[in-house]
Amino acid sequence: MPLPSRKKLHLGKTPMKFYFRAQDISVNLDGIDVEGSLVLVWKRGTRRTASEPFPIVEELSAVDGSLSRTAATTQDMAQICTMFKSSKGAFEPKLSKVSLVVEPPAGGAGRGGKAEQGKKLGSTTLDLGAYASVDMTSHPVELSFLDGKASVTMTLASHWLKNLAAGGPSDDGSSVASFCTDADSDAGSEASERSELEERSAPARSNSIKSAVRAAGAFGGMRRSRANTSAAAASGLEERSAPPGCSGLGGGGGGGGGGG
């Protein structure tokens, strides 16, 4: 029996683009013996966004001597996805996956002397449909991992992007990872445009260089021509300025000898 298409599943429902932001993220690890740093991974569909590693802090209680392990980050994480609202105003469930990954201490080595890789502690689901609203909202959220041995608390903000057209299933699961790379994409586009402009202007620059070379050659020819003209003029001037009879001294002396 064929499965119903996505269009039929969303038939009669309004697609709306939403922006979800997780902030004030903190992790409690009292039930786990672990050290190093944590990375929080938030995934929806094929897209994912991950935090930078943030350190696990151990603290010994002065009251009862118990050891607590916590971690917190000021980094915000976000997801952008299409939500579907029914005619009654309710939103369809939209499940996302949140995972905790522990990164070993800096310089930690595993087998064979290779750097130790991160290890997933656990995962849980977060239904974004439960927090979607046409109004801007902010809700406290607590997620449990490993049967309550670890927990994540955060504030989840929801914002309907009214001016952004809701896409189809292909954009379902778009994450802020892509949102955060918009500047890089713009920079890449600008670099591409600059490269294209440089390629276009290269022939013009080449022609300009060739013209300059030709002009320099012509200028050099003119200088050589002027130099030759000046030399000829100087030679003629020397001949004209010589004392009268100087050019026939030898002839005159010969004549005088004949007379003697």
Image (tube, rainbow, N blue to C red):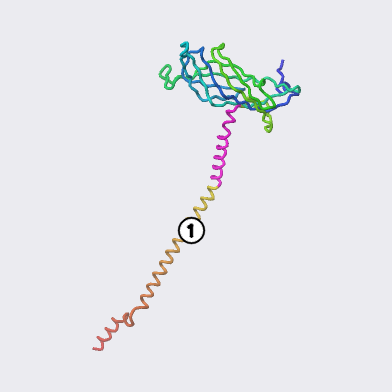
Type of residue at label 1? Ala
Image spot of residue 60 (x, y percent): 46, 14
Q: Which residue is mark 1?
A: 215
The span picked out in magenta is: 175-200
Q: Position of residue 185 (x, y in %)?
A: 57, 35
Q: Is residue 188 magenta?
A: yes
Main SS, magenta region, reads helix
Which residue is the extreme one toward the left?
260
Is 197 part of what is drawn in magenta? yes
Where's the N terminus, which quadrant? top right
Q: Residue at x 57, y 38 (%)?
A: 189
Image quadrant in which you'd find residue 96: top right
| Residue extending farthest front | 63
* Front residue of 212 and 124: 124
Q: Nearer the viewer, residue 199 or 89?
A: 89
Compare residues 160 and 180 and report the one nearer the observer: 160
Q: Residue 12 at x, y = what percent?
A: 76, 24
User: What residue lies at 65% left-to-right and 21% top-to-bottom?
Assistant: 128
Q: Position of residue 237 (x, y in %)?
A: 38, 75
114 with respect to 204 (left or right): left
Q: Residues within 10 Å of mark 1 (few under 14, many from 20)?
A: few
